[in-house]
Amino acid sequence: PLLALVNVHIEKRLDAYKLVKLMQSPEPRMVVGMGRAFNAFVVVTGLGLLVSGLLLYFTQYPGGVCDSCTMFGNCGTCGGTSVELILPESSTEERLFLLAAGEHAMLMLMYACFTSASLGKDIIHEQYRQKFYENRLQSMESANDLHRARRSTHGAAQ
């Protein structure tokens, strides 16, 4: 029991040290806008468009099969996929083409919206301030590194 008590005490101290010293939060940085999260949002949105199109094409709805249904396509009157129900008179190739064209049109619309959005003067000013701040931090860090290197070589020379 005494060894277990000592072990728990040591573990408690080690865990406290890990939390306080080793697992510190990163230093906060000034960022204009959402930063990397916005890029991830755009990628997920594009993937969502693709998945939605695939769901439209491959999800089967219940219904019987009649004589006019083929192996690759449904006639559109007796169940089938959403694309078959929406475009019953189209062939399988036309359905695939229209689905792919619709998806690409939505991707182009998304791209056009993101690229044509004009930035206000305040946002441009904040982006300039952010770049200035980052450049200043880099120059300060490189100056500190140079100062440390000089001190270490100067101390070694004596």
Image: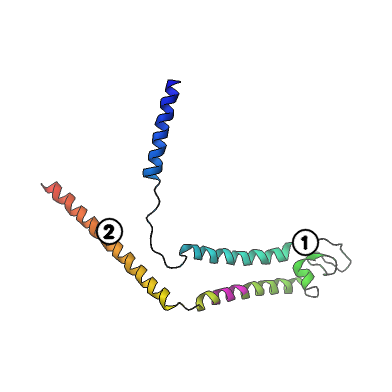
Height in image: 23 above or below 27? above
Which region is colored magenta? 106-112
Within 10 angstroms of label 2, few (less than 14), some, or many (20 or more) residues? Answer: few
Percent from the top left, x then y, of residue 155? 14, 48
Percent from the top left, x then y, of residue 85? 79, 69
Q: Amino acid at mark 2?
A: Glu
Percent from the top left, x then y, of residue 40? 52, 63
Q: Quadrant of residue 87?
A: bottom right
The residue that appears at 41% across and 30% down in the rendered structure is 9
The residue that appears at 41% across and 26% down in the rendered structure is 6
**Which of the numbered marks, if any, corresponds to residue 128?**
none
> For the view shown, which residue lies furthest in the left direction?
158
**Which of the numbered marks, if any, corresponds to residue 141?**
2
Name the foreground residue: 66 vs 52.
52
Residue indicated by mark 1: 60
Q: Amino acid at mark 1?
A: Gln
The residue that appears at 54% across and 67% down in the rendered structure is 42
Name the foreground residue: 158 vs 141.
141
State the count of labels.
Answer: 2
Type of secondary structure dominating the magenta stretch:
helix
Residue 107 on the magenta segment: yes
Q: Quadrant of residue 27?
A: bottom left
